[in-house]
């Protein structure tokens, strides 16, 4: 998967720190002025988890 800002934020905040998608939204809004919908973030997170499961 291509490592973009959203993917990196999801991996760092949700997977490593154990925080929720609201934190990712806040981080992207404050740091990069990106408005990301929670549904989009949820689907991207599911895709990350699916690809990790397929690799393992």
Image (cartoon, grey):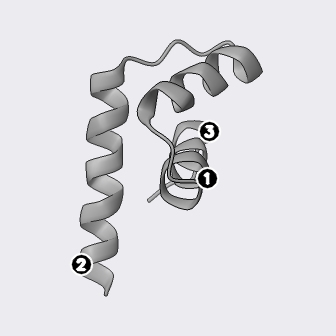
From the image, tell me which residue sits under label 3: 5
Q: Where is residue 41 in the image (x, y as percent from the top left)?
A: 37, 33
Assign a secondary structure to mark 2: helix
Residue 30 vs residue 6, the one in the foreground: 30
| Residue drawn at (35%, 22%) of the image | 38
Mark 1 to mark 3: distance in Å?
11 Å
Mark 3 to mark 2: distance in Å?
23 Å
Q: Earlier in the sequence, mark 1 or mark 2?
A: 1
Q: Where is residue 11 in the image (x, y as percent from the top left)?
A: 53, 54
CA neighbours of label 3 inside 10 A, class few (<14), some (14 to 19), many (20+): few
Q: Where is residue 36 in the image (x, y as percent from the top left)?
A: 46, 19
| Residue drawn at (34%, 72%) of the image | 52
Q: In this view, does 36 lie above or below 21?
A: above
From the image, tell me which residue sits under label 2: 54
Q: Which of marks 3 and 2 is nearer the N terminus?
A: 3
From the image, tell me which residue sits under label 1: 12
Mark 1 to mark 2: distance in Å?
20 Å
Q: Earlier in the sequence, mark 1 or mark 3?
A: 3
To which quarter of the image does residue 5 belong? top right
Q: Which of marks 1 and 2 is in front?
A: 1
Q: Tell whether 16 sits left or right of 32.
A: left
Q: Tell whether 18 sits left or right of 52.
A: right
Q: Which of marks 1 and 3 is in front?
A: 1
Residues at discs 1 and 2 in contact (Cβ within 8 Å): no
Q: In which quarter of the image is the N terminus?
A: bottom left
Assign a secondary structure to mark 3: helix
Q: Is residue 27 above or below residue 19?
A: above
CA neighbours of label 2 inside 10 A, class few (<14), some (14 to 19), many (20+): few
| Residue drawn at (60%, 16%) of the image | 34
């Amino acid at each position: 998967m291509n490592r973009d800002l959203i993917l990196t934020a999801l991996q760092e905040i949700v997977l490593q720190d154990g925080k929720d998608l609201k934190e990712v939204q806040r981080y992207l809004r404050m740091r990069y002025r990106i408005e990301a919908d929670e549904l989009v973030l949820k689907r991207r997170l599911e895709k990350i988890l699916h690809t990790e499961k397929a690799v393992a």
